[in-house]
Amino acid sequence: MGRLFLAVLLSAVVGPGIGQLFNREFKKGWILIGISLVVLLAFLVWVGKAAVLYVPAGIEKVDLEMARQIRWAILRDHPVVFRTYQGLLIGVWLIGVVDAFLGAWRRRQATPRPPA
């Protein structure tokens, strides 16, 4: 039961694909890690491009309060794009957690047990 819990915990806390690597499902683990990184990178690029539109012209430094205002403006003006990326990241995370559980469960069932 400990290996099953650890595989799920690794995928849930560290990130999608880590539980698969722990389960020795390397191809699946690296694919999930890659998908997560691609979606996250695409999101960060989108946020960067969107944020540039809200920075006033001629400003040299963005302080914390301005960054907060820009963040809220992006969320207000682009909720569908933001929620789409959020949904994709949560979906990949959930797939990683569930698959880590199922992979650990299959390994547990396939392991021969000594007679009681």
Image (spheres, grey):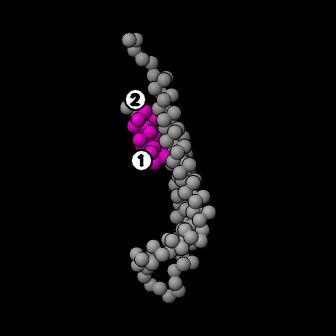
Judging by the rendered image, the residue that carries numbered circle 1 is 13
Q: Quadrant of the N terminus?
A: top left
Question: Residue 74 appears at what percent x and percent y?
Answer: 55, 71
Residue at the image point whose x is 45% and y is 74% from the top: 67
Overall secondary structure of the magenta section: helix
What residue sits 42% from the left and 43% below the top?
10
Amino acid type of disc 2?
Answer: Met
Image quarter of residue 95: top right
Q: Quadrant of the C terminus?
A: top left
Q: Is residue 112 left or right of residue 77?
A: left
Q: Which amino acid does label 1 sit on?
A: Val
Q: Is residue 14 visible?
A: yes
Of the pair 87 and 10, the residue shown nearer to us: 87
Is residue 96 placed above or below 87 in the rendered structure?
A: above
Is residue 67 within the magenta segment?
A: no
Does residue 114 appear left or right of residue 73 in this picture? left
Q: Residue 66, percent across and down?
A: 45, 78
The residue at the far front in this view is 76
Q: Which of 86 and 21 is in front in this view?
A: 86
| Residue reaching furthest to the bottom | 58
- For label 2, count other residues whose C-alpha is less than 10 Å away and answer few (under 14), some (14-19) or many (20+): few
| Residue interval drawn in magenta | 4-23
Residue 52 horizontal/vertical position (percent): 54, 76
Count of number-bearing discs: 2
Q: Residue, x 46% and y 35% (percent of image)?
A: 23
